[in-house]
Image (cartoon, helix red, strand yellow):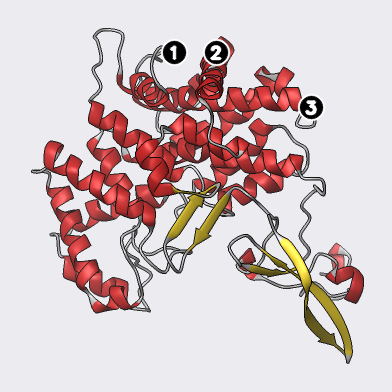
Amino acid sequence: MSSTNEETAKLIIDGKEYALPIRIGTEGNRAIDVSKLYAMTGHITLDDGFANTGPTMSMICYVDGENGVLRYRGYRVEELAERCDFTETAYLLIYGELPTGDQLEEFRTNIRVHTLLHEGMKRIFAGFPPQAHPMAILSAVVGALAIYDKDSADPVDPVQSELAIYRMLAKMPTITAFCYKQSIGQPFIYPQNKLTYCQNFLHMMFAVPSEQYRMPVDFVNALNVLLILHAEHGQNCSTSAVQMVGSSNVNLFSSISAGICALWGALHGGANEACIKMLEDIAADGRDLGKYVDRAKDPDDPFRLMGFGHRVYKNYDPRATIVKEICHRLVDKYAADDPLFELAQELEEVALSDPYFVERKLYPNVDFYSGIIYRIMGIPNNMFTALFALGRLPGWVAHWREMHLAPGKRIHRPRQLYTGHSEREFVPLIKR
């Protein structure tokens, strides 16, 4: 839903003037279209980290970091978190509209019938040592789906693509739960399709064959909201990785595996895991919050308070507002006496009252609170990012699908500004 008008940006190079069209988005956001810049001028744009570069036009997600706005397909994320479940939100992101009752039931049914993994995939899990990080296992096993589900590996075939989407959504909770079971040496728990998406995942995570597992309703509801809030966030690092890899016409499973690898980093999805580790380190160091706050303020100290601030949001992250309420409610009910949660609350109070953080708009973000919630639910630290991947999956799929449906789709091939040696004469080994 973008438009162009007669307005252009003028670029002057060596006295020659070039007109570049300006594209205007639905919300009035503006972009200078440089897609023909190299052909017109022989120049490229240089933009480290793509901070000012839009690689695509998208109808999926709108983020306004200045005003703290996040919408999926035009709907406020706060409303979706309150009124939808995760599969309903996934349908919205992937297909563009909220489903009717019949459409939602068909969508859920198509997911349920694909929750099982091929039995041969158990050997892949068994090949990893117990100390392997779940994200390493997750990316490898998701990539292996291209081997076991070859009849849905062609991204150009619409029937196979649709089947791949159902299988990816269905098998991701199973794979994620199996990663956890492998790491602690417990037997795999097969999915039960009578359960909801979130119930099924928690059952596979925590049930054991020797006794019945009863999951707290609070945990199911909290997980549902967390997955919705993590489901999509525009052109972040992992989504861009999915698109970059998928633009080569590789299968959906390999594209999602690339996104998982990108998400693993501490500067992206790994932040919630790093946040809890930071709290543990502060607790082990005598709970001296002042020391660590001062270190965070010191420009010469590499230490940073994890879970505070955001690359996009220069206002309060709307997701963090929701997660904060859930977090405090669960802490009061299940972990009021846990010293780590007391420390987290003290750190939150310091950050919200310290002028240094307030002036720089370094508010507690979604990673700060989500890690605490996962810990209350009994999910170990090394599984936090895997839960993030499970939530972000619909957004990755939506962008992958939108890219393949775009009439102007082309393989991503960024350019670079070469700054190395000019041509040099080769020196034989004996003379070096």
Which residue is at the front of the view, 200 or 64?
64
Q: Amino acid at mark 3?
A: Asp
The image shows residue 115, relative to residue 331, as above or below, that is above
- Rendered image quadrant of residue 130: top left
Can I make out residue 340 in this image? Answer: yes
| Circles 2 and 1 in contact, beta carbons < 8 Å | yes
For label 2, the SS is: loop
Residue 365 in picture, x, y percent from top left: 35, 57
Q: Residue at x 37, y 79 (%)?
A: 299
Residue 155 in picture, x, y percent from top left: 75, 31
Residue receiving disc 1: 193
Position of the N terminus, as image quadrant, is: bottom right
Task: For marks 2 and 3, give the CA distance.
Answer: 21 Å
Circle 3 crowding by C-alpha within 10 Å: few under 14, some 14–19, many from 20: few
Position of the C terminus, as image quadrant, is: bottom right
Q: Residue at x 77, y 45 (%)?
A: 406
| Circles 3 and 1 in contact, beta carbons < 8 Å | no
Numbered tag placed on residue 113 in the rendering? 2
